[in-house]
Image: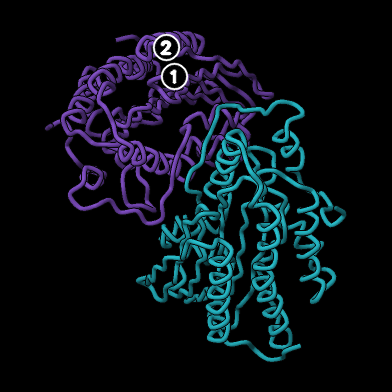
Chain colours: A cyan, B purple
Amino acid sequence: MTEGKVSKESIVHHFKELQDSICNSLQSLDGIAHFEEDNWELSTGGGGRTRIIQGEHIEKGGVNFSAVSGPSSDRLRALLQKEGDTFFATGVSIVLHPANPHVPIIHLNVRYFEMEEEVWWFGGGIDLTPHYIVPEDGGYFHRKLKATCDQFDAGYYPKFKTWADDYFFLRHRNETRGIGGIFFDRLTGDSSNMGDLWSFTLAVGESFVDIYSYLFNRNHFRPFTQVEKEWQLYRRGRYVEFNLVWDRGTRFGLETGGRTESILMSLPDLAAWKYDYIPPEGSKEAETLKWLRKGIDWTAF
Amino acid sequence: MTEGKVSKESIVHHFKELQDSICNSLQSLDGIAHFEEDNWELSTGGGGRTRIIQGEHIEKGGVNFSAVSGPSSDRLRALLQKEGDTFFATGVSIVLHPANPHVPIIHLNVRYFEMEEEVWWFGGGIDLTPHYIVPEDGGYFHRKLKATCDQFDAGYYPKFKTWADDYFFLRHRNETRGIGGIFFDRLTGDSSNMGDLWSFTLAVGESFVDIYSYLFNRNHFRPFTQVEKEWQLYRRGRYVEFNLVWDRGTRFGLETGGRTESILMSLPDLAAWKYDYIPPEGSKEAETLKWLRKGIDWTAF
């Protein structure tokens, strides 16, 4: 248990380290590709390091660090229902679109936000979008997340799992984006528990490599057919729909002048739409659709 | 000049005829593919006929007719800033994604809306999104639209052309979707001019076949390279971004329980994203980007 306020400099330092270590691990996993780094600055203050991989196994992936600040807009104040003249926001965001349809898409975000120093919070989460749902892999994924949560608070996993189910949901399709994960936002308190909340947020970020390596190694050698590749492109279409229509971070960024290319690094290399496509009954594709709903206790698999 | 209120039954009848004649013409143009029709109903009232073509020359296209009604939601009243317990909306919408990157994407919409009968208006427009901008083709397109407008009101083209520039604009990219066209909404009045407004709206719809046939016939036999095909997929990514992030009709439909597959028929078969792609200076792709801005007088080409 750490007491006292955690400085934003320390958070920034650890988020950069997190980005570095995740990029190193992913390069080893892919085996061939390297991340290309783009350093950028925002005119209002701060900037980021966007790192993109377009590899053999990771068809397109981004690992983004940013730390930005500036005057609060009316829009930001309205959205947050908080007063304050300036804001500071830092975080690490990852989306990986693998080449092999048997490897799931994964998304991580950990972030820290403050307004005028006295208002602050942490947020983040990890969620998984398999093109083909393998219940045991879903079980592994959720048990790992639960174990990370349980180190800090036994109430976290149930609460943040439900939050992910609700957040990563395509209302216009009445389906979840994938098998969910955890999502949390506005974790706040006072100087007595800020250290714990920060440790939890960082632990979520640090759990990423183990989780993804396991799922990658179990699946990336599996051969796949043209039908499976097409299904992957079609499911990526849903990913695009979620990110552009419903994801609050994406929409807020695009509407308020964030750096477009860093925000949209989450979009896949290639995505497909087919009019009113319904996979044949009993097919693996139809089976996967049955799992795309809220409220499944994945830890039971 | 037609006086008196135009009945919604008559509007529906003509919109269905418009859909039929456009589909027939597009089938002749494509030469091989036929439209598949889906008849659907909304639980609140009414329904539509969605027609999809996936052809030799038109890679994916939709020509949708709908006429729906129901109780007005709070959301609808807030959006329209109008009171009224029920609404009725009918229209024809088209989006065509051609196979050949030298043929432009085209979009048409004509619509009629009423609330409790005393509040009514027409809206619509046509806009063009070439993957490669050919100024003379842009000139032809805009002169045809201007000629259609000028038959009714010399003020229409300048006003509706500017409206299209503003509407079909990707703020997060600071670029227009294509070379614009015309866009108009809430054309209303009283029984003395309703007939004229309706005739104008229908004339816009009826101008579609001539315009698209001309542009298609000029370009669809041109050979294309792999680079040009990839550029097309990349530009389609922008089309997806516009439709899902900014298009009010799409967003309103998805958020309020419209028929998702009919709304998203506008999305292409295949689209691509590349991180921070900047085409080589002096390339045809870079030239096209220079034209993606508001305020160009296309009728001068």
Question: What amino acid is labelled 2 in the image?
Answer: Ile
User: With respect to residue A92, does B229 lie above or below?
Assistant: above
Front in this rendered view, residue B133 or A143: A143
Please check whether the numbered discs 2 and 1 fall on a single chain.
Answer: yes
Chain letter of the residue carrying label 2? B
In this view of the protein, can residue B167 be seen by the observer? no
| Residue closest to the eye, B213 or B184 | B213
Q: In the visual, does B36 lie left or right of B2?
A: right
Q: Could you tell which of marks 2 and 1 lies nearer the N-terminus?
A: 2
Secondary structure under the numbered disc 1 in the rendered image: loop
Q: Nearer the viewer, residue B43 or A48?
A: A48
Badge 1 crowding class, 10 Å Cα cut-off, few under 14, some 14 to 19, many 20 or more, is some
Gap in angstroms between the C-alphas marked 2 and 1: 7 Å
Residue highlighted by disc 2 = B32
Q: Position of residue A223 (x, y in %)?
A: 64, 43
Residue B55 is labelled as 1
Q: Residue B23: horizontal and vertical position, in percent?
A: 43, 12
